[in-house]
């Protein structure tokens, strides 16, 4: 083998190494962008949750939650607290849904979180009525996922299942 052939082989190897490096950097950039979006979504979600949480009265919310679960009528103050709490829960679940879609939350973990949707938003529930109105404040993808989960589990009375255990 002569020196020209060796130099040509080295040039080809160098070009392949540069191409491989560029592909690796592109993949890393895409991953970094995805993480940046996830962090931004987390920050916005947390800001919404903190704002809503600051206005809740824990004692009133405790009573409201028990009454809503039992299907009892809530006073205006209880309903106001309960609505804000449901909004907080939904904002957190919306963030979890997007973290799952981005591959940052595994499927089993998302399924565990999604069970809260069934618990709170079941047919005829106070929270379900709130969802019918509040769903417009959430992304179309999240709304479609919530509706899919509720439809798939519409015959399940999660509260009764928990009580049975």
Image (cartoon, rainbow, N blue to C red):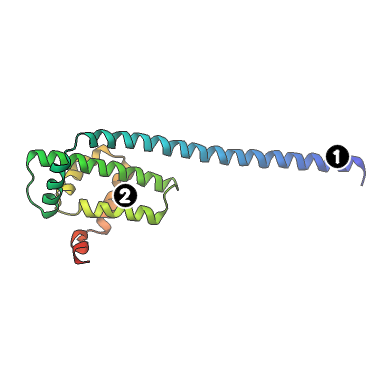
Query: Residue pushed farthest right?
Result: 2
How far apart marks 2 and 1 lie (CA) works out to 58 Å
For the point 19% across and 66% down, which residue is it?
Answer: 164
Describe the element under mark 1 as helix, strand or loop.
helix
Residue 16 to residue 160: above or below: above
SS for tag 2? helix
Expressed as whole percent of the image width and height from the top left, the position of residue 36 reads 46, 36
Q: Which residue is mark 1?
A: 7
139 sits left or right of 72 in the view: right
In which quadrant of the rendered view does residue 42 lie? top left
Q: In the rendered view, does 24 fall on the left or right side of 48?
A: right
**Is residue 40 rendered to the left or right of residue 140?**
right
Q: Earlier in the sequence, mark 2 or mark 1?
A: 1
Q: Residue at x 74, y 39 (%)?
A: 15
Q: Where is the C terminus found, in terms of image quarters?
A: bottom left
Spot occupied by residue 159 in the image (x, y as percentages of width and height): 19, 59
Residue drawn at the location 26% of the way across and 44% of the way down: 89
Left or right: 119 as drawn, with respect to 28: left
Q: Residue at x 31, y 46 (%)?
A: 93
Using a 10 Å C-alpha cutoff, classify the residue at mark 2 as few (fewer than 14 neighbours), some (14 to 19) or many (20 or more).
some
**Residue wearing tag 2:** 145
């Amino acid at each position: 083998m002569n020196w020209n052939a060796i130099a040509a082989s080295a040039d080809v190897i160098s070009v392949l190494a540069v191409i491989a490096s560029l592909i690796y950097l592109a993949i890393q950039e895409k991953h970094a962008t995805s993480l940046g979006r996830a962090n931004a979504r987390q920050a916005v979600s947390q800001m919404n949750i903190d704002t809503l949480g600051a206005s809740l009265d824990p004692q009133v919310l405790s009573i409201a939650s028990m009454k809503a679960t039992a299907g009892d009528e809530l006073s205006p103050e209880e309903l106001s607290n309960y609505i804000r709490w449901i909004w907080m829960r939904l904002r957190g679940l919306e963030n979890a849904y997007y973290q799952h879609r981005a591959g940052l939350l595994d499927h089993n973990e998302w399924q565990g979180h999604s069970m809260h949707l069934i618990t709170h938003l079941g047919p005829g529930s106070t929270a379900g009525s709130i969802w019918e109105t509040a769903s417009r404040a959430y992304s179309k993808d999240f709304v479609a996922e919530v509706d899919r989960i509720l439809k798939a589990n519409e015959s399940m009375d999660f509260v009764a299942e928990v009580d049975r255990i």
